[in-house]
Image (spheres, rainbow, N blue to C red):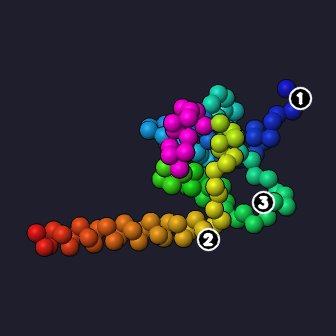
Amino acid sequence: INKLRGYFEKPHIVVGLGFRENGKVAGALDEKCYPWMGDIYHLLKKDDLFGSEFDMNEREIVEYLNSIYVQKYVKDIYREITYHLSISQLKSLPLPTKSEWESIKLWKNLLINLENNECHREIKCA
């Protein structure tokens, strides 16, 4: 082999193609550059003009791809259309900036705390 593809040369994100466990997308950081084959997409960061405002690192992107938000989005938008996630569908996933992602997680934690407080209040009142 004269030249390896870019994703065999440096650590990158891999995303499973098929829906797992009721609509889940599986993303991971491949630090060993394993030559994955089959239903896997290799995501490489582009350093270009259009990506200059995007500031999430690879671990944060994997966390986001595996989050309940992306799982629900993919399930709601694509699950009825196809069993597999295509590269076009993957490209169309909304990607937040780092501050947007932190805000989303903060809101999630606030909602969980509110739900827990409501549950405790109902138990005390009963």
The three-letter code of the residue at mark 2 reads: Ser
| Separation (CA) of disc 3 from disc 2 | 15 Å
Range of magenta residues: 73-85
Is residue 100 something that shows in the picture? Answer: yes
Q: Taking 87 as reference, is 118 left or right? A: left
Q: Which residue is mark 1?
A: 2
Q: Secondary structure at mark 2?
A: helix
- For the point 62% across and 47% down, the residue is 29
Sequence order check: which comes first, mark 3 or mark 2? Answer: 3
Q: Position of residue 61 (x, y in %)?
A: 62, 55
Q: Nearer the viewer, residue 125 or 116?
A: 125
- For the point 57% across and 51% down, the residue is 65
- For the point 64% across and 55% down, the residue is 94
Q: Quadrant of the N terminus?
A: top right
Q: Quadrant of residue 82?
A: top right
Nearer to us of marks 3 and 1 is 3
Instruction: Tell me if residue 38 comes above or below residue 48 in the rendering.
Output: above
Report if residue 80 lies within the magenta region. Answer: yes
Q: Taking 43 as reference, is 113 left or right? A: left
The three-letter code of the residue at mark 1 reads: Asn
Sequence order check: which comes first, mark 1 or mark 2? Answer: 1
Q: Which residue is mark 3?
A: 51
Sequence order check: which comes first, mark 3 or mark 1? Answer: 1
Q: Nearer the viewer, residue 101 or 36?
A: 101
Total numbered labels placed on residues in the image: 3
Residue 99's disc is 2
- For the point 75% across and 52% down, the residue is 45
Q: Quadrant of residue 114?
A: bottom left
Q: Nearer the viewer, residue 13 or 23?
A: 23
Q: Taking 99 as reference, is 48 left or right? A: right
